[in-house]
Amino acid sequence: MPFAQIHMIEGRTEEQKRAVIEKVTQALVDAIDAPKANVRVWIHEVPRENWGIAGETAKSLGR
């Protein structure tokens, strides 16, 4: 059972997350011939203050 973990800064819409799940699922089906029903995708949303970029938080950088 393929299992994909996606870590992203919080703030995406439900529609965007649905699109990520759909496209990652299809990519695994295409790449390894996995049955679609067996693919699992987990989106882990990270608060902006917990995401570091070049020594700063994404929140402090306005991202």
Image (tube, grey):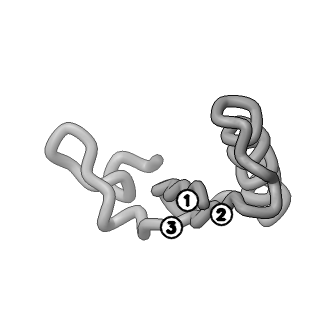
- What residue would you read off at disc 3? 44
Disc count in the image? 3
Q: Position of residue 42 (x, y in %)?
A: 58, 66
Identify the residue at image location x=30%, y=66%: 50
**In the figure, is residue 57 to the left or right of 20?**
left
Check residue 3 in the rendering and tell me which mark sits there, or answer none.
1
Res 17 → quadrant = bottom right
Secondary structure beneath disc 2? strand
- Residue pictured at 72% horizontal, 62% vertical: 38
Q: Tag 1's secondary structure?
A: strand
CA–CA distance in space, label 1 to label 2: 5 Å
Q: Are marks 1 and 3 in contact (CB under 8 Å)?
A: no
Q: Residue at x 50, y 58 (%)?
A: 5
Q: Tell me the quarter of the picture where residue 4 sits.
A: bottom right
Q: Amino acid at mark 2?
A: Arg
Measure the alpha-carbon separation of dots 1 and 3. Answer: 13 Å
Q: Is residue 18 above or below residue 31?
A: below
* Relative vertical location of residue 40 with respect to residue 58 in this rendering, above or below: below
Q: Badge 3, how many Cα within 10 Å: few under 14, some, many 20+? A: few
Please tell me which residue lies in front, 45 or 20: 20
Question: In this image, 5 relative to 16: left or right?
Answer: left
